[in-house]
Structure formats: structure tokens, C-alpha cells
Image (cartoon, helix red, strand yellow):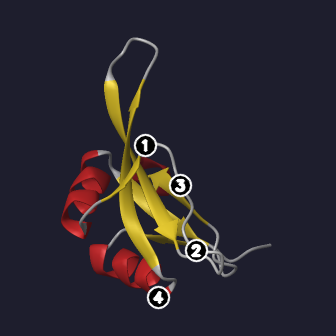
Amino acid sequence: MSNTHTLTRHSDIQSWVSDRKGIPAIARIRNRFGEEKSKLLLRFVRSQGLGVDDGMSPCSWTAWFAELDRQQLALKITPTGEYELVPRAALN
């Protein structure tokens, strides 16, 4: 059983991502009705370097956290470095 943690504090999230050489990014995606939505992403430097990701734009932590709060998301992490963004409502 993996020992997961869920981070909601901005400073904890930024420290976890930065410790793993990550940066925040936002992708703008359109649904089937043409409505635009923001998708939060984290981008990590691998030994091969950064690849090209369609629609992914690096952004400031301020913009990323504003969108994280707007969407009411938290960062769920595992000891192996895996992560996912989950709804904060699922924490209760």
C-alpha cells in the first residue's frame, strides 16, 4: 500500500515541485462545444530534457495557484514521485 499525501498549501506544493526540478504550466483546452477551459499541469525536467507538449505553456506560480484555487484542486503525491491533481471536496 502506498503512503500518499495530499498537499493544499501553496508553499508545500511549490517546494515539492521545485525539489523535483518542476515548473507550473497551464494548457488551454476546448470541449466539444468550443468552450475553453484551463488544465493545470506540472512539467518536470528529465535527463533527456524537456520535450514539446502541445498546448502547454509555462506560467508563474501566482497564475497557477490562482487556477488551482479556482478549480478547488489539491496535489496528491506518493513517495515514488507520482502525483495527480484531485478535487479538494474528495478530501472530506
Rendering quarter of residue 71: top left
In this rendering, the count of numbered labels is 4
Say what secondary structure mark 1 lies in.
Answer: loop
Q: Residues within 10 Å of mark 4 (few under 14, many from 20)?
A: few
Judged from this view, the residue extending furthest toward the top is: 33
- In the rendered structure, which disc, 2 or 4, sits on the residue that comes first in sequence? 4
Q: Which residue is drawn at 26% across and 61% down?
A: 65
- Mark 4: secondary structure: helix
In space, the residues marked 4 and 1 are separated at their CA atoms by: 25 Å
Q: What residue type is labelled 1?
A: Gly
Q: What residue is shown with label 1?
A: 55
Q: Residues within 10 Å of mark 2 (few under 14, many from 20)?
A: few
Q: Which residue is drawn at 39% across and 11% down?
A: 33
33 or 71: nearer the eye? 33
Q: Residue 79, relative to residue 26: is it above or below?
A: below
Q: Which one is in front in this view, the residue at disc 1 or the one at disc 3? A: 3
What residue is shown with label 3? 52
The residue that label 4 is drawn on is: 19
Crowd around label 3: few <14 · some 14–19 · many ≥20 (10 Å):
few
Which residue is pictured at 46% across the width and 63% down the height?
A: 42
Label 3 to label 2: alpha-carbon separation: 10 Å
Q: Nearer the viewer, residue 80 or 86?
A: 80
The residue depicted at 46 percent of the width and 75 percent of the height is 22
- Sequence-wise first label, 3 or 4: 4
The image shows residue 31, relative to residue 42, as above or below, that is above
Between the residue at mark 3 and the residue at mark 4, the CA separation in whole angstroms equals 22 Å
Question: What secondary structure is found at the residue carrying circle 3?
Answer: loop
Q: What residue sits right under mark 2 in the picture?
A: 49
Residue 79: image x %, image y %? 66, 81
Q: Mark 1 and mark 3: span between their CA atoms? A: 9 Å
